Amino acid sequence: MGISNRIEWVDIAKGIGMILVIAGHTIALDYSAPIYTFHMPLFFLLSGLFIHTNEDIRTYTFKKMKSLLLVWLIAFLISLGICLLIPTWRELITLNAFVKDLYSANTNVIQNSSLWFLICLFAAEIIFWIIDNIKQKMKPYLFYSLFILYALTVLWLPSILNYISQYVPLIDNRLPWKIDTSLCATVFIAIGNWCKPYIMKYVSKIKIIYVFIIAICWFFLAKFNGWTNMNALSFGRHRLLFYPTACIGVLWVIGLSYNIAKTCGVVSNFLSIYGKSSLIIFVSQSMFIRLYILLMNQLWDLDMTLYANNPMIHQIGSFVVVGFIVSPILAYIYTMYLLKHE
């Protein structure tokens, strides 16, 4: 989709999502935990709006490799190069850690753990192609019954993988390359893809007052279900609430994004640029946050780490620096590049 024919509220939603991702990585988990209930499902659901599975699997896979895996490879090599230039980071790169990170796709050893999203999105979109093509060959009631069973089974993946690991060695009881997380992500891609006509038709009906009501409902559900993390396959105290909580969280962001697109010019423009560059920001923000922490640790003799309850001034500082200085600069440069090649 070219930059000139994008849907503005979708870009705004991605922009909001990216700010929430950065907040979740900079603000201590004691405060940012509710964000994790829906910020990743938001990106997968929005991706589902624009997936077309009418191509053959070879063409479809090649396109996804070019748009996702190539970006992953470039970001991986850049991150590795930066790590090799910084002595304290270079010392952490061992063969065992490197192999483990390649297996898990978390890439902590190169100080850019957010790269997992590209691997996960790639696998999820391939899985969705298979599921959607099966859907076209089955009776609707039978297919949707089986898909609901599939979605529910995903919620018990940790227990299933723990059982399997007794017979098949699995690192950290996880499948390689985020395949297990991709199975969950596919559910949200499917919701976005199959519900697209309804989303596009009724998003304009979500008035701002409804946005606040939906957001309040989401917040209480999030607090009730407790800690969730889609990447870690943590679905909360009451795992059956994971999908409803995530979808309600996505719904209020979508409604808010549509209202911003219609009424808030400056904010709309900022978030739109942010959203158009969300992939570039996503694959770089984790490393920039770690660079901030590394620099502050050395300047002030601190011992801050990612996700920890660091001094509040640095939680806010890293959020502001990465979220509202570094990332907007990257977004602007990337947007200018897209316009030049439109």
Image (spheres, rainbow, N blue to C red):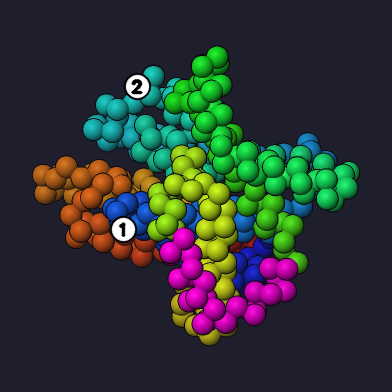
User: Is residue 326 shown to the viewer in this render?
Assistant: no
Instruction: Identify the main secondary structure in magenta.
Output: helix
Give the percent coordinates (x, y) of residue 330. Answer: 44, 58
The disc placed on residue 31 is: 1
Q: Callout 1, which amino acid?
A: Tyr
As drawn, 282 above or below 174: below
Residue stretch rendered in magenta on the structure: 198-221
Q: Residue drawn at (50%, 56%), measured in percent from left and top?
A: 38
Q: Is 83 included in the stretch rendered in magenta? A: no
How crowded is the residue under tag 2: few (<14 C-alpha within 10 Å), some, or many (20+)? few
Q: Callout 2, which amino acid?
A: Thr
Q: Quadrant of residue 93?
A: top left
254 or 302, nearer to the observer: 254
Whole-angstrom CA distance, mark 2 to mark 1, is 33 Å
Q: Is residue 181 left or right of residue 5?
A: left
Dot 1 falls on a residue whose secondary structure is helix
Give the percent coordinates (x, y) of residue 259. Answer: 55, 79
Q: Quadrant of residue 319?
A: bottom left
Q: Which residue is mark 2?
A: 94
Q: Residue drawn at (45%, 71%), measured in percent from left and top?
A: 216
**Quadrant assignment for the C terminus:** bottom right
Q: Is residue 78 left or right of residue 190?
A: left
**Quadrant assignment for the N terminus:** bottom right
Q: Residue drawn at (76%, 52%), measured in percent from left and top?
A: 52
How crowded is the residue under tag 1: few (<14 C-alpha within 10 Å), some, or many (20+)? few
**Who comes first in sequence, dot 2 or dot 1?**
1
Q: Residue drawn at (44%, 53%), measured in percent from left and top?
A: 225
User: Is residue 137 shown to the viewer in this render?
Assistant: yes
159 or 67, nearer to the observer: 159
